[in-house]
Amino acid sequence: AQSVTQLDSHVSVSEGTPVLLRCNYSSSYSPSLFWYVQHPNKGLQLLLKYTSAATLVKGINGFEAEFKKSETSFHLTKPSAHMSDAAEYFCVVSDLDGGSQGNLIFGKGTKLSVKP
Amino acid sequence: NAGVTQTPKFQVLKTGQSMTLQCAQDMNHNSMYWYRQDPGMGLRLIYYSASEGTTDKGEVPNGYNVSRLNKREFSLRLESAAPSQTSVYFCASSPLAASSTDTQYFGPGTRLTVL
Protein backbone atom coordinates (compact mmCIF):
# COMPACT_ATOMS: atom_id res chain seq x y z
CA ALA A 1 0.00 0.00 0.00
CA GLN A 2 1.09 3.54 -0.65
CA SER A 3 1.94 5.93 2.17
CA VAL A 4 3.54 9.34 2.59
CA THR A 5 5.53 10.86 5.46
CA GLN A 6 6.12 14.56 5.92
CA LEU A 7 9.23 14.84 8.01
CA ASP A 8 8.49 18.20 9.66
CA SER A 9 5.21 19.23 11.22
CA HIS A 10 6.30 22.89 11.37
CA VAL A 11 8.91 24.88 9.43
CA SER A 12 9.74 28.51 10.14
CA VAL A 13 11.76 30.68 7.73
CA SER A 14 12.50 34.36 7.30
CA GLU A 15 11.10 36.26 4.34
CA GLY A 16 13.52 36.08 1.40
CA THR A 17 15.22 32.86 2.53
CA PRO A 18 14.83 29.43 0.90
CA VAL A 19 12.03 27.03 1.77
CA LEU A 20 12.47 23.26 2.04
CA LEU A 21 9.53 21.02 2.98
CA ARG A 22 10.45 17.35 3.12
CA CYS A 23 8.37 14.39 2.00
CA ASN A 24 9.12 10.68 1.70
CA TYR A 25 6.77 8.19 0.11
CA SER A 26 6.31 4.46 0.07
CA SER A 27 4.94 2.75 -3.00
CA SER A 28 5.33 -0.55 -4.80
CA TYR A 29 4.70 1.18 -8.10
CA SER A 30 5.92 4.31 -9.80
CA PRO A 31 3.61 6.71 -8.00
CA SER A 32 1.84 9.93 -8.86
CA LEU A 33 2.77 12.56 -6.29
CA PHE A 34 1.25 15.92 -5.48
CA TRP A 35 1.78 18.93 -3.27
CA TYR A 36 -1.31 20.81 -2.13
CA VAL A 37 -1.41 24.07 -0.15
CA GLN A 38 -4.07 25.18 2.32
CA HIS A 39 -4.21 28.78 3.45
CA PRO A 40 -5.93 29.46 6.79
CA ASN A 41 -9.65 28.67 6.72
CA LYS A 42 -9.53 27.85 3.01
CA GLY A 43 -9.82 24.77 0.84
CA LEU A 44 -6.86 23.00 -0.74
CA GLN A 45 -5.17 24.14 -3.92
CA LEU A 46 -2.85 22.11 -6.14
CA LEU A 47 0.73 23.44 -6.18
CA LEU A 48 2.25 20.84 -8.50
CA LYS A 49 2.16 17.18 -9.46
CA TYR A 50 4.52 14.49 -10.68
CA THR A 51 3.18 11.84 -13.05
CA SER A 52 6.31 10.05 -14.35
CA ALA A 53 7.40 12.70 -16.83
CA ALA A 54 10.23 15.12 -15.87
CA THR A 55 11.58 14.47 -12.37
CA LEU A 56 11.85 18.20 -11.61
CA VAL A 57 8.36 19.61 -11.47
CA LYS A 58 7.59 23.31 -11.46
CA GLY A 59 4.44 24.57 -9.81
CA ILE A 60 2.65 27.79 -9.08
CA ASN A 61 4.05 30.71 -7.06
CA GLY A 62 7.69 29.73 -7.66
CA PHE A 63 7.54 26.33 -5.97
CA GLU A 64 9.16 23.24 -7.40
CA ALA A 65 9.72 19.64 -6.33
CA GLU A 66 12.12 16.93 -7.39
CA PHE A 67 11.15 13.28 -7.61
CA LYS A 68 14.05 11.08 -6.46
CA LYS A 69 13.23 7.42 -6.82
CA SER A 70 16.46 6.22 -5.18
CA GLU A 71 15.64 8.23 -2.05
CA THR A 72 11.83 7.79 -2.29
CA SER A 73 11.56 11.53 -1.76
CA PHE A 74 9.55 14.38 -3.24
CA HIS A 75 10.74 17.50 -1.39
CA LEU A 76 9.17 20.89 -2.06
CA THR A 77 11.42 23.93 -2.46
CA LYS A 78 11.23 27.64 -3.17
CA PRO A 79 14.28 29.91 -3.52
CA SER A 80 12.87 32.88 -1.64
CA ALA A 81 9.95 32.81 0.81
CA HIS A 82 7.23 35.43 0.73
CA MET A 83 4.88 36.32 3.57
CA SER A 84 1.96 35.03 1.49
CA ASP A 85 3.54 31.53 1.48
CA ALA A 86 2.55 31.05 5.13
CA ALA A 87 0.14 28.10 4.97
CA GLU A 88 -0.11 24.37 5.52
CA TYR A 89 1.38 22.12 2.84
CA PHE A 90 0.36 18.55 2.15
CA CYS A 91 2.38 15.93 0.31
CA VAL A 92 0.05 13.45 -1.35
CA VAL A 93 0.41 10.13 -3.16
CA SER A 94 -2.23 8.70 -5.44
CA ASP A 95 -3.56 5.24 -4.67
CA LEU A 96 -2.83 2.90 -7.55
CA ASP A 97 -4.72 -0.18 -6.35
CA GLY A 98 -7.60 -1.51 -8.45
CA GLY A 99 -10.94 0.21 -8.12
CA SER A 100 -9.68 2.86 -5.72
CA GLN A 101 -7.24 4.17 -8.29
CA GLY A 102 -7.24 7.94 -8.12
CA ASN A 103 -7.87 8.16 -4.39
CA LEU A 104 -5.41 10.42 -2.62
CA ILE A 105 -3.39 9.50 0.47
CA PHE A 106 -2.38 12.60 2.42
CA GLY A 107 0.58 13.28 4.62
CA LYS A 108 -0.13 14.89 7.98
CA GLY A 109 0.90 18.32 6.73
CA THR A 110 3.70 20.82 7.33
CA LYS A 111 2.81 24.24 8.63
CA LEU A 112 5.05 26.91 7.11
CA SER A 113 5.57 30.14 9.03
CA VAL A 114 7.29 33.12 7.39
CA LYS A 115 8.85 35.77 9.61
CA PRO A 116 9.29 39.35 8.36
CA ASN B 1 -17.09 29.41 -12.75
CA ALA B 2 -17.94 28.37 -9.16
CA GLY B 3 -15.94 25.09 -9.15
CA VAL B 4 -16.83 23.00 -6.08
CA THR B 5 -19.36 24.47 -3.68
CA GLN B 6 -20.33 23.19 -0.24
CA THR B 7 -23.21 24.03 2.07
CA PRO B 8 -23.39 24.89 4.88
CA LYS B 9 -20.10 26.59 5.77
CA PHE B 10 -20.60 26.09 9.51
CA GLN B 11 -22.89 23.84 11.54
CA VAL B 12 -23.34 23.01 15.22
CA LEU B 13 -25.23 19.83 16.13
CA LYS B 14 -26.17 18.09 19.32
CA THR B 15 -25.24 14.44 19.80
CA GLY B 16 -27.76 12.21 18.05
CA GLN B 17 -28.99 14.81 15.57
CA SER B 18 -28.79 14.14 11.85
CA MET B 19 -27.75 16.37 8.98
CA THR B 20 -26.72 16.32 5.34
CA LEU B 21 -23.75 18.14 3.90
CA GLN B 22 -24.25 19.20 0.32
CA CYS B 23 -21.63 19.37 -2.42
CA ALA B 24 -21.95 20.38 -6.05
CA GLN B 25 -19.48 20.85 -8.89
CA ASP B 26 -20.01 22.59 -12.20
CA MET B 27 -16.95 21.25 -14.03
CA ASN B 28 -18.60 18.12 -15.49
CA HIS B 29 -16.26 15.93 -13.45
CA ASN B 30 -16.82 12.21 -13.14
CA SER B 31 -15.37 11.52 -9.70
CA MET B 32 -16.34 13.08 -6.39
CA TYR B 33 -14.96 12.63 -2.87
CA TRP B 34 -15.68 13.42 0.77
CA TYR B 35 -12.80 13.94 3.22
CA ARG B 36 -12.54 14.92 6.84
CA GLN B 37 -9.66 16.97 8.22
CA ASP B 38 -8.61 16.72 11.85
CA PRO B 39 -5.64 18.52 13.45
CA GLY B 40 -2.36 16.69 12.79
CA MET B 41 -4.07 14.00 10.70
CA GLY B 42 -4.05 15.42 7.18
CA LEU B 43 -7.16 14.60 5.16
CA ARG B 44 -8.79 11.19 5.34
CA LEU B 45 -11.15 9.84 2.73
CA ILE B 46 -14.67 9.03 3.93
CA TYR B 47 -16.44 7.98 0.72
CA TYR B 48 -15.92 8.46 -2.97
CA SER B 49 -17.87 8.14 -6.18
CA ALA B 50 -15.82 7.21 -9.22
CA SER B 51 -18.72 7.90 -11.54
CA GLU B 52 -22.40 8.73 -11.47
CA GLY B 53 -24.34 5.87 -9.91
CA THR B 54 -21.43 4.38 -7.93
CA THR B 55 -20.17 4.97 -4.41
CA ASP B 56 -17.46 3.26 -2.38
CA LYS B 57 -16.07 3.41 1.13
CA GLY B 58 -12.83 5.16 1.88
CA GLU B 59 -10.60 4.98 4.92
CA VAL B 60 -13.09 6.21 7.57
CA PRO B 61 -16.69 5.50 6.44
CA ASN B 62 -18.27 4.51 9.78
CA GLY B 63 -21.11 6.79 10.85
CA TYR B 64 -21.62 8.28 7.37
CA ASN B 65 -23.68 7.63 4.28
CA VAL B 66 -23.45 9.23 0.85
CA SER B 67 -25.63 9.77 -2.18
CA ARG B 68 -24.45 10.59 -5.69
CA LEU B 69 -27.64 12.36 -6.69
CA ASN B 70 -26.51 13.07 -10.24
CA LYS B 71 -23.24 13.90 -11.96
CA ARG B 72 -23.05 17.32 -10.25
CA GLU B 73 -24.05 16.54 -6.67
CA PHE B 74 -22.63 14.32 -3.94
CA SER B 75 -24.08 14.56 -0.44
CA LEU B 76 -22.77 13.28 2.89
CA ARG B 77 -25.21 12.32 5.65
CA LEU B 78 -24.63 11.89 9.35
CA GLU B 79 -27.56 9.86 10.68
CA SER B 80 -26.76 10.22 14.39
CA ALA B 81 -23.99 12.70 15.02
CA ALA B 82 -21.31 11.97 17.63
CA PRO B 83 -18.68 14.30 19.14
CA SER B 84 -15.99 12.26 17.33
CA GLN B 85 -17.44 13.59 14.07
CA THR B 86 -16.46 17.14 14.97
CA SER B 87 -14.21 18.03 12.05
CA VAL B 88 -13.80 20.05 8.88
CA TYR B 89 -15.33 18.29 5.89
CA PHE B 90 -14.08 18.81 2.36
CA CYS B 91 -15.69 17.76 -0.87
CA ALA B 92 -13.54 17.33 -3.98
CA SER B 93 -14.00 16.37 -7.60
CA SER B 94 -11.75 15.19 -10.42
CA PRO B 95 -12.33 14.93 -14.16
CA LEU B 96 -11.72 11.26 -14.77
CA ALA B 97 -13.08 8.09 -13.20
CA ALA B 98 -10.43 6.28 -11.19
CA SER B 99 -7.24 7.84 -12.53
CA SER B 100 -4.07 7.96 -10.48
CA THR B 101 -2.74 11.04 -12.28
CA ASP B 102 -5.87 13.15 -11.98
CA THR B 103 -5.96 16.45 -10.08
CA GLN B 104 -8.63 16.84 -7.43
CA TYR B 105 -10.34 20.19 -6.96
CA PHE B 106 -11.51 21.03 -3.46
CA GLY B 107 -14.42 22.97 -2.05
CA PRO B 108 -14.04 25.54 0.75
CA GLY B 109 -15.06 23.11 3.52
CA THR B 110 -17.77 22.75 6.16
CA ARG B 111 -16.83 23.22 9.82
CA LEU B 112 -18.98 20.86 11.90
CA THR B 113 -19.11 20.84 15.69
CA VAL B 114 -21.02 18.13 17.55
CA LEU B 115 -21.75 18.90 21.18
Image (tube, grey):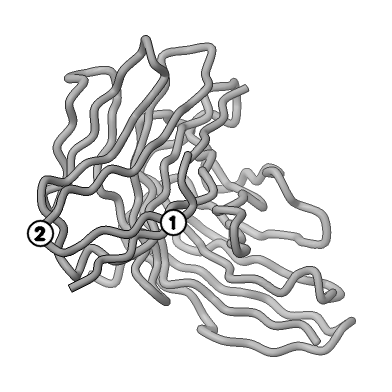
| Res B110 quadrant in image | bottom right
| Residue A89, disc | none
Question: Residue B18 at what x, y percent from top left?
Answer: 80, 80
Rate crowding at label 2 as few (under 14), some (14 to 19) or many (20 or more) other CA atoms within 10 Å. Answer: some
> What chain letter is assigned to the residue under label 2?
A
Q: Is residue B107 above or below residue A32?
A: below
Q: Secondary structure at mark 2?
A: loop
> What chain letter is assigned to the residue under label 1?
A
Picture quarter with the C terminus of chain A? bottom left
User: Is disc 2 in contact with disc 1, using a CB cutoff of under 8 Å?
Assistant: no
Label tally: 2
Q: Mark 2 highlights which residue?
A: A16
Q: Mark 1 highlights which residue?
A: A10
- The residue closer to the viewer here, B35 or A85, is A85
Task: Kindly identify the amino acid type of the residue bearing the numbered disc 1.
Answer: His
- At x 65%, y 79%, the residue is B112
- At x 41%, y 35%, the residue is A23
Question: Residue A64 at what x, y percent from top left?
Answer: 18, 39
Picture quarter with the N terminus of chain A? top right
| Res B69 quadrant in image | bottom right
Left or right: B20, with B101 as reference point: right
Left or right: B60, with B62 as reference point: left
Q: Is residue B13 above or below residue A111?
A: below
Question: Residue A10 at what x, y percent from top left?
Answer: 44, 56
Q: CA distance from mark 2 to mark 1?
A: 18 Å
- The residue closer to the viewer here, A59 or B12, is A59
Question: Residue A80 at what x, y percent from top left?
Answer: 11, 53
* Marks 2, 1 in one chain: yes
Q: Is residue B16 above or below residue A82?
A: below
- At x 18%, y 31%, the residue is A57
Q: Who comes first in sequence, dot 2 or dot 1?
A: 1
Task: Kindly identify the amino acid type of the residue bearing the numbered disc 2.
Answer: Gly
